[in-house]
Amino acid sequence: MSTLALALEDVAHAFGGVQALAGVSLAVPAGCVYGLIGPNGAGKTTLFNVITGFVTPDRGRCLLHGAPITGLPVHEVAAHGLARTFQNIRLFAEMTALENVMVGLHRQGTTGVLGAVLRTAGARREQADFSRRAADLLERVGVSGHAGRRAGTLPYGLQRRVEIARALATAPRILALDEPAAGMNAAETDALRALIAGLRTDGLTVLLIEHDMRLVMGLCDRLAVLDRGRLIAEGPPATVRGDPAVIEAYLGHAPVAGAAC
Amino acid sequence: MPEARRLRLLGLALGLAALLLAPFLVDALLGRAWVRVLDLVLLYAMLALGLNIVVGYAGLLDLGFVAFFAVGAYLYALCASPHFGLHLPFWLLLPAAALLAAAFGMLLGAPTLRLRGDYLAIVTLGFGEIIRIFLNNLNAPVNLTNGPQGITMIRPIEIAGVSLARPLEIAGLTLPSLYLYYYLFLALAALALVISARLEGSRIGRAWIAIREDEVAARACGVNTRDLKLLAFALGASFGGVAGALYASFQGFVSPESFGLTESIMILCMVVLGGMGHVRGVVIGAAILVALPEALRYTGPLQRVLFGSVYIEPSDLRLLLFGLALVLVARWRPAGLWPSPVRRRELAERHAPGGVEAGR
């Protein structure tokens, strides 16, 4: 397990005069849950957008399992095995939960216009296969009872899970979750924690932006802390939480022990 | 469920019989002029289904769709009329119209890939106007399109030596020309409907709808949005091209003024009014918007009988009612008159006591 799932080399990006990322280098080992934390505006989401191809950085590059992905279109980054969810859920609201997940399977299919119009045996088989796999994924995230409902009408917690199922459908090697626990109650967060831990057991690398410190400290194998576009600490949670630079970034100057609440 | 299946087959058979008998019934009850309206309903249904792929599925607001209609119509007009002395056969021109329109669709799609919503609408509107203005002015220095006079004496469609412009006698039954066109248009509109419906539920259709719902998320799911948008433009345009070729032969005459902005907006209204993204709704939308103006013609004489003179011109009334219909649909039925099954199920659930909505 010594291989790197993701490597960032000196990534820098500015929006106008704001230096969102000022030279960040990271190494994410494969098969772990890697937390990315930091105060608001630290550059976490920008870093996510760089990794997933939505933003091409001014400087530096990203390697996904050794393959450079910087500058590739988003759908090709996805094809390299990187899936993501969004901070503010972005489901296809008018589609059912099942169809949402089936869109995630899109790349693994081959049915074209002709196959779809003629309903060839191959197209029918693929459709049935997609539908079964999508149902399995929904069951895995615990939303199987709502497969036929329009995604936009599902309760918030379920929408988060459908989004995770959709990301998993792309058969990723790295799953990037942007604040998955935001707005969840304690029970929902616990279910999320179990889900992510299960994904890790299956060998998936999970990259996690999260503000819920209980979740982050309990779940992540390693943490990176960003502040104002810089990496200020990196390591196992126990080390990071005692780091003076981290405490300062979160709480100001007073040296408080055990910043995690 | 063999019972449900049998019922479905029965419904299908009855529907088919009704469609086949429609021109006879309409002719007997309403008169020959209404058979012509029926033909036009099918033609516009084809157009609306084409635009539905672009607007309804992929969510790309296209206000210049009539341009593809024009491309198909002029291709047919130029290649089957005395204008150039060309008389190419129908079976060749129909696919050619589809292909040429598809090429124009890509031509419009390629530079507008990054645009969405209002911006895309403005560019497509401009594109539609450009095509019309070209057709209007390409009569000098070389006379290609005969300018504003348009092209006349376009050959009617001939299938296996049978001209659709003359009545056909089969087994003692005389089918007038309008009936023959009806059956041809019916077959092609049905084809357009089947293609649309099958695409909708397929991998391709899902990717289009995903782009409509959230393009960013669609890309993150690995959907190549560029290729799929171009595909939507090309395929939608090809429907328009076929409808255009049929229109040219049906009317026997084309001129640039048939392809203005109002026409594009009419087709868009059919899609929106009927139910965006739902093929049956779109066909209903086309039927209503083609038949309504014809029905409103009667209001002129009616007003004269009732009030002694015509206070509101039927053509003004038409625009008034269209506007009103759109406002009412936007307010009360935002998903259209006949929304897609998923939407209907949702509405039913919300109203049912103890529905899933209560689980929140």
Image: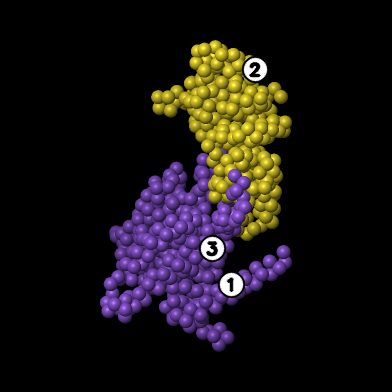
Chain colours: A yellow, B purple
- Which chain does tag 2 point to? A
Q: Distance between the residues labelled 3 and 2?
A: 61 Å
Residue of label 1: B15
User: Is A147 rendered above or below residue B70?
Assistant: above
Seen at 51% across and 34% down, the residue is A54
Mark 1 vs mark 2, foreground winner is: 2
Q: Are marks 1 and 3 in contact (CB under 8 Å)?
A: no
Mark sitting earlier along the chain (1/3): 1
Q: In x, y percent, where is residue B149?
A: 31, 67
Q: Residue at x 56, y 83 (%)?
A: B170
Name the amino acid, label 3: Arg
Which residue position holds label 3?
A: B280
Tell me which amino acid carries mark 2. Ala
Callout 2 environment at 10 Å: few (<14), some (14 to 19), or many (20+)?
some
Q: Is mark 3 on a helix, strand or loop?
A: helix
Q: Please, what secondary structure does the residue beneath circle 1 have?
A: helix
Q: Residue A238 carries which label?
A: 2
Same-chain check, marks 1 and 3: yes
What is the total number of numbered labels drawn onto the structure image?
3
Residue located farthest toward the front when viewing the structure as drawn: B353
Label 1 is found on which chain of the structure? B
Q: Which is more foreground, mark 3 or mark 2?
A: 2
Q: Which amino acid does label 1 sit on?
A: Gly
For the point 40% across and 58% down, the residue is: B327
**How many angstroms separate mark 1 from mark 3 (CA)?**
13 Å
